[in-house]
Amino acid sequence: MRNLFVAIIALGLLFNCNLLLSQTEQQKPKLGILLVFDQLRGDYISKWQDHFVKDGFLRLTSEGTWFENCHYPYSGTVTGAGHATLTTGATPSIHGIIGNDWYDRKEGKNSYCAASSRWTSIPPVPVVIAVPGTTVKIRVSGTPEKLRAETLGDALKRSTNNQGKVVSLSFKDRSSVLPGGMKPDYCYWFDSSSGKFHTSSYYSNKISPWLADFNESKFVDQWRNKSWEKLYPDKDYKIFSSIDEQTGEGNGKSQGKSFPHPFGKTEKDYYDALYNSPFGNDVLIELAMKAIKAEKLGKNTQPDMLLISFSSNDSVGHSWGPDSQEVFDTTLRTDLLIRNLLLYLDKEVGKNNYVIALSADHGICPLPEVSKAKGLDAGRLATDKFAKEIETALQGKFGKPNAPAKYLEAFSDTSAYLNYAALKANSINLDDATTHIKTWAASQPGILTAYTSKEITQASTSSDPLLVSVSKSWFKGRSGDICFILKPYYIPGAYLTGTTHGSSHPYDTHVPLIAFGGGIKNLLIKDKVSPQLAASIIAEGIGISTPASAEFSSPKEIWQENK
């Protein structure tokens, strides 16, 4: 009898324990949110925090955990790689998205990271008929099939037996496709030729009713015949950024170099200009709020995932540069957008019922002309010309190959792909060819160094931090044979104005990382971390498994004790 009584007590304690565990699980937030502000450099928040409202960025940093010293650990800091890293918790060497595009040897052409001609746009876009004597670019549409690692969305589907919802939204296709993973419920991006949000036939043959309503509402057309004016016209922007028209600035989408910036007159010009202004972000946040309400995100029995990437910050930064009044104004408007989003989430989802990880996919290099004016060694590397010089250097060493072959098969971003057939036909060893180009590159203007594929694949034993960062961007079968590293403040490309990113230099690798929401402490962490943490923080916050290839666990110190 006594043993039976003890057994009953034990069963009761076990039942109560399981009940408590179940209750604890239920208390976890039901909505995980990845907020990406494309090209929001890591220093902007501290640099301009005196100009923010109290309940935007400052609410995030005063109530959440701010990782002040957050840097990407790899060299290929571009949009595709950054979004894949944020949502997988892995580096490009694991998830395979080494850039926005790369050279595909089998296809003999560049391959885009997030689309394929196998899929079509939904709703369909108008067919463009080629003018005689011209060609039309082959239509492609979004697909995540080139990803080689599980994303947050995939982990949620696995953890909830496909019951949790995944919604991914952006202006850029790749910034929606890559975070969304393999099986999102909804994955939408903006098409500037139609002024509507689209998906692809990879996901569905139709769009949701709430997106159809949004597309038909013409919300995106409210800025027609208007101009982008400064948010605070009485504030002297010059003090906090620069003069309104710096040397090296671009004209945007026919918007001019200085305020006010008009929107285009034709259909496509208008939508391109909208994208290239902070108001593109306003469009996206309106759509995101529609999705939250329509899909009851955070109110379902299983946790849900919302992935939002704001692309307009990036477009503005490319055109006018990080020290411009345009980027300053866009960041101030981003602050207001965050305030409005948080207020909406508090009301619609519940103040402690969501967890946010806010970050960016990369930073941005200053305009080379601005850097030069400050006395820095800076410049622009014309990659087409540089590629021809590589071929000349190879022929100077090994002689001319049999026409029409060339030793250099392709040059993509800052990587060279050598022609293996031409090397073999001329009895040239690949290591000899890459070693020669590495030595030659050391004396070229704007080049800091170069690494061969052999060096990169052996980087695990190297004490060279730059080589290690390059290796984290290298993926067998997709990466080139030689990777060139430009000197700080040099940028690649054919354009003569504007700026870009894509290096391992701090201005490109430094991004914000803020964790905010239910169960998260208020901390300022100054230790160097990677944005890869975003995936594990969101997963831990809503009680799902971390993506399978995530490199880091969620930091224990950021969670409240009852978490």
Image (tube, rainbow, N blue to C red):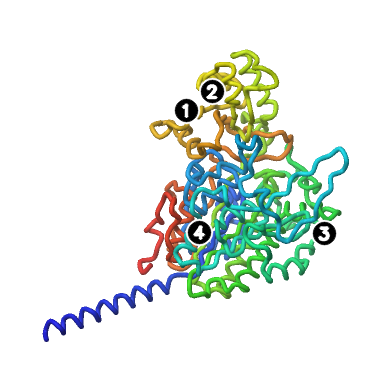
Asked whether the viewer can see residue 505, the reply is: no
In this picture, residue 537 sits left or right of residue 84: left
Identify the disc placed on residue 391: none
Mark 2–mark 4 CB contact (< 8 Å): no
Badge 2 marks a residue whose secondary structure is helix
Q: Earlier in the sequence, mark 2 or mark 4?
A: 4
Residue flagged by tag 1: what amino acid is it?
Answer: Lys
Residue pictured at 60% horizontal, 66% vertical: 341
Q: Earlier in the sequence, mark 1 or mark 2?
A: 2
Query: Residue 63 at x, y = what percent?
Result: 48, 64
What's the CA distance linking mark 2 and mark 4?
39 Å
Residue flagged by tag 4: what amino acid is it?
Answer: Asp
Mark 4–mark 3 CB contact (< 8 Å): no
Badge 1 marks a residue whose secondary structure is helix
Q: Nearer the viewer, mark 3 or mark 1?
A: 1
Q: Which residue is mark 2?
A: 434
Q: Which residue is mark 4?
A: 154
Badge 3 marks a residue whose secondary structure is loop
What's the CA distance linking mark 1 and mark 2?
9 Å
The relative height of residue 460 versus residue 235 in the rendered view (above or below) is: above
Q: Which residue is mark 1?
A: 454
Q: Which residue is mark 3?
A: 226
Q: Earlier in the sequence, mark 4 or mark 3?
A: 4
What's the CA distance linking mark 4 and mark 1?
34 Å
Residue flagged by tag 2: what amino acid is it?
Answer: Thr
Mark 1–mark 2 CB contact (< 8 Å): yes
What's the CA distance linking mark 3 and mark 1?
55 Å
Query: Residue 279 at x, y = what percent?
Result: 72, 59
Asked whether the viewer can see residue 80, the reply is: yes
Q: Earlier in the sequence, mark 3 or mark 1?
A: 3
